[in-house]
Amino acid sequence: AKKHLAEFDALIDSLKPRFAHRGDRPLLMVTLLDARHMLVFGNNCLFQEVLDSFGIRNAWEGEMTFWGSTAVGIDRLAAFRDVDVLCFDHGNEREMQTLMATPLWQAMPFVREQRFLRAPAVWFYGATLSAMHFARVLDNALGGKA
């Protein structure tokens, strides 16, 4: 267990410099549930420790469950300005394409500003292995970018 935790810490430490010049733009993490709803991840989710380690603020400050997530209507995302949005895919490509073709989606500030990023699935309710996978996914999406 100690070796694994040391590996986790080493991975986080190795990736920190990649986020050093990112600025203070918060990150909204979501996954599509259906044509009208997203699951958003708040500060009680598994990924928060990774975000904190990289100095990235979580954009979601609303209600959430014990697990650090909540389902919201897609229209609620229109309130988010000057954020990066990371959307975890999970085999729902057809639904994503349908959503992304709607006028509502195209009007989202983060879509217009090209700050919507799609990422491979990450197990949201896992432990350190999931957190390590998330750190790598986050690095691929945002690491080294301002």
Image (cartoon, grey):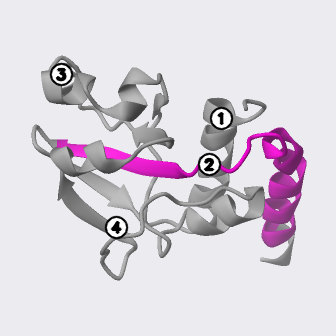
Disc 1 to disc 4, C-alpha distance:
21 Å
Q: Earlier in the sequence, mark 3 or mark 2?
A: 3
* Amino acid at the residue labelled 4: Ser
Front label number (3 vs 2): 3
In the depicted structure, whether residue 79 falls above or below residue 2: above
Q: Residue at x 64, y 66 (%)?
A: 128
Q: Nearer the viewer, residue 134 or 86?
A: 86
Q: Residue 82 location in percent, x, y?
A: 50, 41
The magenta segment = 4-33
| Within-10-Å neighbours for mark 1: few <14, some 14–19, many 20+ | some
Which residue is painted at 77% across and 77% down in the image?
Answer: 1
Residue 124 falls left or right of residue 8:
left
**Which residue is denoted by mark 1 in the rendering?**
142
Image quarter of the C terminus: top right
Label 3, on which residue? 94
Between tags 3 and 1, which lies in front?
A: 1
For residue 29, above or below residue 90: below
Q: Badges 2 and 4: C-beta atoms under 8 Å apart?
A: no
Q: Position of residue 96 (x, y in %)?
A: 23, 27
SS state under label 1: helix
Q: Disc 3 marks which amino acid? A: Arg
91 or 67: nearer the viewer: 67
Amino acid carrying label 1: it is Leu
